[in-house]
Structure formats: structure tokens, C-alpha cells
Image (cartoon, rainbow, N blue to C red):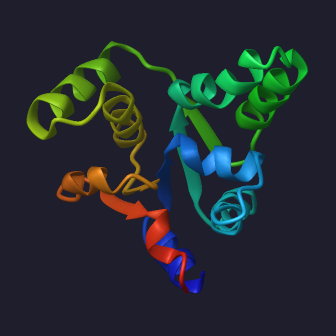
């Protein structure tokens, strides 16, 4: 887990993919400790976090499916009020950059939007659990959470 902290510290501004929040909120037995390290560092100001409104949509889908409006609203409040975390809106500039990422690297629309939003905010690293995003390594330091499981 120290290796994850060291890697994150190099970036200063870190883009966060949705699963990082889901693991934390749902206390995933495998990934919650790693998510906790990341989010604690952001909360304490060790580094800045950035995600997009895509994360807001994705973390609230399950509570809405289960008709648990209070949980969906709680998740939203946690996200938008989290210290040292910026939630970037998907505007035309981000959409254009995402289209260029999709064209060049063939990444999914949500992934392209997440990474484009992170880049627009100055992120130097992107924390995900999707190894397929490693193809973006030439643009941003893609950190795959699963690579740190056996520390």
C-alpha cells in the first residue's frame, strides 16, 4: 500500500475513475483499503483528486435501481462535498477531447470522458481498475488499483 501512496504522490493531481468511489462506498473487501488510502490522501490534502459528473451518475445507479433515494442523495453529497476533490462537468471542450481519445485509442465513451475531464483539470495520473486504459500511458500515468493488491 505504501507503493500506491508513493505513486500517487508523484502526480499531485489525480484523476479518479468511478470504481474507486464504489469500492470505498460499498466497502469492497479487496479494494476498499486501497481506495481508502487514495481518498484519505485527497481528504488530507496530500494530493488533489478530480473526477467527472460521469462518476456521479455511475455511483448512484444502483441506489436508484433499488429505489433507495436517500442513499443516492447521500452518495451525491459525499462526492460533491469531498475535500480537495473537484467534480468536472462534461462540457464541449471535454467532449471534444474525449472524442479524440476514442478516435486514437479506442476507449469506451465513459472512460474517454473520465480521462478527458481529468486531463482538462491538469491531472498527471489516472487511478482506475481497468487495465485496458493502460494504452493511455503516453498521455497520463495510468495507475491500475489491482496492481497493488498483493503489497
Where's residue 90, x and y in %?
44, 19
In this picture, is 49 found above or below 63? below
Q: Specify the quadrant that holds the N terminus.
A: bottom right
Q: Residue furthest front?
A: 66
Within the image, what quadrant is residue 114 found in?
top left
Residue beneath the point at 20% across and 23% down: 99
Name the side, left or right, on which 52 lies relative to 66.
Answer: left
Out of 128 and 116, give the one closest to the viewer: 128
| Residue 60 position by quadrant | top right
Please tell me which residue lies in front, 74 or 8.
74
| Residue at 77% over, 35% down | 81
Task: Judge by depth and name the residue closer to the eye, 85 or 146.
Answer: 146
Q: In this view, does 117 lie to the left or right of 105?
A: right
- Does residue 88 sit above or below 7 in this rendering? above
Q: Position of residue 23 (x, y in %)?
A: 67, 51
Residue 92, given in percent of the width and then of the height, sits at: 32, 13
Q: Please give the name of the residue rendered at 19% of the width and 30% of the height, measured from the top-left corner.
A: 102
Question: Residue 127: x, y in percent?
Answer: 46, 56
Q: In which quarter of the image is the C terminus?
A: bottom right
The tally of labels here is: 0
4 and 13: which is toward the camera: 4
4 lies above or below 17 = below
Residue drawn 76% across the image and 24% down it: 63
Amino acid at each position: 500500500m505504501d507503493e500506491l501512496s508513493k505513486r500517487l504522490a508523484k502526480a499531485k493531481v489525480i484523476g479518479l475513475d468511478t470504481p474507486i468511489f464504489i469500492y470505498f462506498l460499498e466497502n469492497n473487501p479487496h479494494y476498499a483499503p486501497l481506495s481508502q488510502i487514495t481518498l484519505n490522501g485527497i481528504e488530507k490534502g496530500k494530493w488533489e483528486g478530480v473526477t467527472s459528473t460521469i462518476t456521479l451518475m455511475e455511483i448512484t445507479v444502483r441506489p436508484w435501481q433499488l429505489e433507495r433515494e436517500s442513499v443516492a442523495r447521500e452518495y451525491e453529497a459525499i462526492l460533491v462535498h469531498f475535500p480537495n476533490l473537484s467534480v468536472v462537468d462534461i462540457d464541449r471542450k471535454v467532449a471534444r477531447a474525449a472524442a479524440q481519445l476514442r478516435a486514437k485509442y479506442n476507449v469506451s465513451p465513459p472512460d474517454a470522458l473520465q480521462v478527458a475531464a481529468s486531463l482538462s483539470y491538469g491531472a498527471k495520473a489516472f487511478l482506475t481498475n481497468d487495465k485496458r486504459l493502460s494504452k493511455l500511458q503516453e498521455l497520463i500515468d495510468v495507475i491500475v488499483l489491482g496492481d497493488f493488491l498483493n503489497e
